[in-house]
Image (cartoon, grey):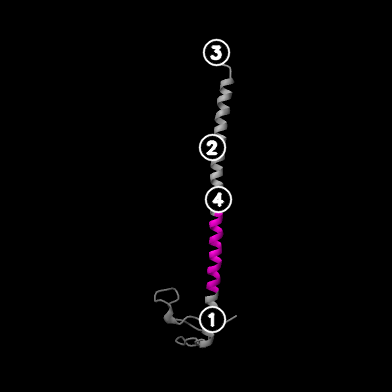
Amino acid sequence: MAQVWPLPSAAVPEGSPGAGPRRTRGGSEGSRPPEPPAGEARELLREVEAQIGEAACSLARILEATCAVSAQVEELATKCSENARFLRTWRDLLREGYESLRPSGGV
């Protein structure tokens, strides 16, 4: 795995949590870590770009799967609504039939 180099202090916006003076182990307060060699920096950049590309592909697949599931959920909700309407109609018909067969209450 490639070594990750810290950002130069100019890359941290003033007022952000990391904007204070930087201290390095074994160095004086004003010293900066050595810059990575140009070849290694380019390799790190390529590696990060590849990881970003892979993440983008993964997110696209997740979005596609989510859209498919969403469509299935909508279809299921429609079927459930139709079944509920059907059952309410049968309930009402059975209630009317039962009520019509009940003997009248006045003896």
**Image quarter in which the C terminus is found:** top right
Q: Nearer the viewer, mark 2 or mark 1?
A: 2
Q: Which mark is residue 44?
A: 1
Measuring 53% from the left and 57% from the top, which residue is drawn there? 67
| Kind of residue at disc 2 | Arg
- Check if residue 54 falls in the magenta segment: yes
Q: Which residues are magenta?
A: 51-69
Q: Do the residues under discs 3 and 4 have CB atoms within 8 angstroms?
A: no
Find disc 3 in the rendering and name its residue: 106
Precedes in sequence: disc 3 or disc 2: 2
Q: Which mark is residue 85?
A: 2
Measuring 54% from the left and 13% from the top, which residue is drawn there? 106
Q: Mark 3: which secondary structure? A: loop
CA separation, marks 2 and 1?
61 Å
Measuring 56% from the left and 59% from the top, which residue is drawn there? 65
> From the viewer's perspective, is residue 91 above or below residue 40?
above
